[in-house]
Image: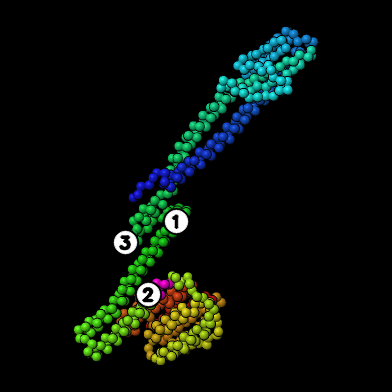
C-alpha cells in the first residue's frame, strides 16, 4: 500500500483544523477575559484613588480653613493627617516652601501646569506600573498646595501576570488535548473510509461480490457505504449479464458458423459440379447468413439501447392508424393465420413511432411462430386516463407459467426443441421490453398452455 505523507492525510488535516479552531477559540476567550479583568482592575484602582483624593481634600481643607497663613504647623498637621492612612495609596505634597514625599519611587512633577491638575495617568517605571492623580487646593491666604496621589499596581499586576501564566498553561494543555482528541475522533470518523479504500483495493473482475462493511450509524459515511455497495451490486449484475450475454452470443454465432464451415468443406471436397449439393449448400449458407444478420442487428440494438434511451424521437402518433397499418401488413405477408382488430377510436399517443412499431411487429412475429395454422391473432387497444394499452392475443400453444418471468432475459428460450422448429434467437422479447422501458411503460404476458397468449404494452399518454 502506498504510504502517504503524514501532513497529507485527511485525518491529520481534520485533527489540525480541530486543534487550531479550538485553540483560536480558547485564545479569543482568554483575550476577552484578560481585557475584562484588566479593565476592571484599572477601573477599581482609579475609583480607590479618586475616593482617597476626596477624603484628603476634605481633611486638608478642614486644617487650612481657619488659618490666615499657611505656616509650618499647618503643613505638619496636613502631613501627619495624611500619613495616618494605612492603605496602598501614597501621597506627595508640594507646598510653597516645602516638598513632602512619602513615596520616593517616582519624583513629583513639580513643573506640572495648573490646567493639567485633575488628570490621572498610568505610567511604567522600572518594570512596575503606577497610577497617579494630580490635584490642587488653595489656602485662604492664596497659597497653592499641589497634591499627588500614587497607587502602586504591583499587586494587581502580579495577579494579572498569574492570570496570563494560567491562560498560557491552559492554552498549551488545551492545544495538546485538542490534538489528541482531534486525531482520535478523526481516525474513528475516517475508519469507514479506510475500510472503503481497503475493500476497493481487493475488488477486481474475479471477486465483484466483495462488499464494504456497513456502518451502524445513519450518517453521511454510512450513506456513502450503502451507495457504493449498491453500485457494486449493480456492477456485479451488469458484469454477470455481460459475461452471459457474450457467452450466449458466441454460442448463437458458433452454430451458423459451424454450418457454413461444414458446407464450405463439402464444396471443397466434392467441388461445385454436384448441382444438388451446391444448391443445398448455398441455400443453407444464405439462411444462416440471414440468421446471423438478424442476430447482429438485434445485438446492435441492445448495445445502442442506452444512447437510444436519451434520444427518443417522441411525437404525437395516431395509435389507431398505427395498429391498423400493422394489421394490414401482416394480413398481406401471412396467409396462414386470421387477423382481427377491434374497433379502435382515433387517439394520439406521445411515443417514438418507429420503436413502438418495431415492438408490436416483434410481438406479432412471436405469435405467428407459436400459433397453429388457421388460428386467430387479435390486436386490441384500451385507453385510460393517464395511459393506454396495446394488446396482441393469439390462440397458440401457450407458455408454462414458470417460464413467463424469464421471457425477457436475453437468449432465453422456453424449449430448445421448439426453437429449432420455429427459429429465433431469444432476443425479440428482450428488445420489446427495452423499447417499453425507454417509454417508461410496462409489459405484461398472460398465457395458458394450449389456449393462447396475450401480450400487453402499457404506455403513458
Q: Is residue 40 left or right of residue 365?
A: right
Q: Secondary structure at mark 1?
A: helix
Q: Is residue 59 left or right of residue 353?
A: right
Q: Estimate the x, y position of residue 163 in percent, counting from the top left.
A: 54, 29
Q: Sequence-wise, which precedes: disc 2 or disc 3?
A: 3
CA neighbours of label 3 inside 10 A, class few (<14), some (14 to 19), many (20+): few
Q: Sequence-wise, which precedes: disc 3 or disc 1?
A: 3
Up-down relation of residue 86 to residue 315 (above or below)? above
Q: Estimate the x, y position of residue 3 in percent, counting from the top left.
A: 35, 47
Say which residue appears at 68% left-offset and 12% top-offset: 99
Q: Secondary structure at mark 2?
A: helix
Quarter-of-image position of residue 119: top right
CA neighbours of label 1 inside 10 A, class few (<14), some (14 to 19), many (20+): some
What colour scheme was applied to this rendering of the protein? rainbow
Distance from the alpha carbon under mark 2 to that under mark 1:
35 Å
Q: Estimate the x, y position of residue 5 in percent, counting from the top left.
A: 39, 45
Q: Secondary structure at mark 3?
A: loop
CA neighbours of label 2 inside 10 A, class few (<14), some (14 to 19), many (20+): some
Up-down relation of residue 307 to residue 122 (above or below)? below
What residue sits right under mark 2 in the picture?
A: 299
What residue sits right under mark 3 in the picture?
A: 206
Distance from the alpha carbon under mark 3 to that under mark 1:
24 Å
What residue sits right under mark 1 in the picture?
A: 224
Q: Which residues are magenta?
A: 298-305
Distance from the alpha carbon under mark 2 to that under mark 3:
26 Å
Q: Magenta stretch mostly in which secondary structure? A: helix
Give the numbered dot on residue 204. none
Nearer-the-camera pick, 253 or 285: 285
User: Is any part of residue 399 visible from this angle?
Assistant: yes
Q: Any magenta on residue 301?
A: yes
Say which residue appears at 38% left-offset and 63% top-offset: 235
Amino acid at each position: 500500500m502506498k504510504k502517504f505523507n503524514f501532513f497529507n492525510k485527511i485525518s491529520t488535516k481534520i485533527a489540525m483544523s480541530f486543534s487550531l479552531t479550538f485553540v483560536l477559540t480558547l485564545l479569543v476567550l482568554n483575550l476577552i477575559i484578560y481585557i475584562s479583568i484588566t479593565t476592571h482592575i484599572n477601573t477599581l484602582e482609579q475609583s480607590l484613588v479618586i475616593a482617597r483624593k476626596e477624603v484628603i481634600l476634605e481633611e486638608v481643607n478642614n486644617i487650612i480653613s481657619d488659618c490666615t497663613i499657611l505656616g509650618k504647623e499647618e503643613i505638619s498637621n496636613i502631613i501627619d493627617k495624611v500619613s495616618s492612612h494605612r492603605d496602598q495609596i501614597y501621597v506627595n505634597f508640594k507646598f510653597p516652601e516645602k516638598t513632602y514625599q512619602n513615596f520616593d519611587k517616582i519624583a513629583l512633577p513639580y513643573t506640572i501646569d495648573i490646567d493639567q491638575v485633575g488628570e490621572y495617568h498610568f505610567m511604567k517605571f522600572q518594570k512596575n506600573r503606577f497610577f497617579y492623580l494630580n490635584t490642587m487646593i488653595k489656602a485662604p491666604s492664596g497659597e497653592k498646595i499641589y497634591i499627588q496621589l500614587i497607587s502602586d499596581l504591583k499587586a494587581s499586576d502580579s495577579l494579572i501576570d498569574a492570570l496570563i501564566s494560567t491562560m498560557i498553561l491552559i492554552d498549551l494543555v488545551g492545544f495538546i488535548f485538542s490534538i489528541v482528541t482531534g486525531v482520535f475522533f478523526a481516525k474513528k470518523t475516517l475508519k469507514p473510509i479506510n475500510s472503503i479504500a481497503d475493500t476497493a483495493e481487493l475488488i477486481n473482475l474475479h471477486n465483484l461480490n466483495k462488499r464494504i462493511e456497513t456502518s451502524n450509524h445513519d450518517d453521511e459515511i454510512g450513506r456513502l457505504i450503502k451507495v457504493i455497495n449498491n453500485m457494486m451490486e449493480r456492477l456485479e449484475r451488469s458484469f454477470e449479464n455481460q459475461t452471459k450475454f457474450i457467452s450466449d452470443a458466441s454460442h448463437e454465432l458458433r452454430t451458423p458458423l459451424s454450418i457454413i464451415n461444414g458446407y464450405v468443406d463439402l464444396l471443397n471436397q466434392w467441388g461445385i459440379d454436384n448441382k444438388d449439393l451446391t444448391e443445398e449448400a448455398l441455400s443453407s449458407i444464405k439462411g444462416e447468413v440471414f440468421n446471423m444478420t438478424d442476430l447482429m442487428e438485434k445485438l446492435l440494438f441492445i448495445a445502442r439501447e442506452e444512447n437510444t434511451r436519451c434520444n427518443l424521437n417522441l411525437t404525437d402518433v395516431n395509435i389507431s392508424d398505427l395498429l391498423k397499418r400493422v394489421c394490414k401488413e401482416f394480413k398481406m405477408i401471412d396467409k396462414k393465420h386470421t387477423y382481427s382488430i377491434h374497433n379502435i377510436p382515433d387517439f394520439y399517443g406521445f411515443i417514438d413511432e418507429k420503436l413502438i412499431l418495431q415492438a408490436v411487429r416483434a410481438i406479432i412475429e412471436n405469435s405467428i411462430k407459436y400459433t397453429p395454422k388457421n388460428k386467430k391473432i387479435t390486436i386490441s387497444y384500451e385507453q385510460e386516463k393517464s395511459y393506454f394499452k396495446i394488446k396482441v392475443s393469439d390462440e397458440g400453444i401457450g407458455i408454462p407459467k414458470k417460464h413467463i418471468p424469464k421471457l425477457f432475459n436475453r437468449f432465453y428460450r422456453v424449449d430448445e426443441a421448439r426453437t429449432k422448429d420455429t427459429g429465433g434467437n431469444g432476443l425479440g422479447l428482450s428488445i420489446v421490453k427495452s423499447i417499453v422501458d425507454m417509454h417508461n411503460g410496462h409489459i405484461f404476458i398472460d398465457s395458458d398452455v394450449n389456449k393462447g397468449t396475450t401480450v400487453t404494452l402499457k404506455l403513458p399518454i
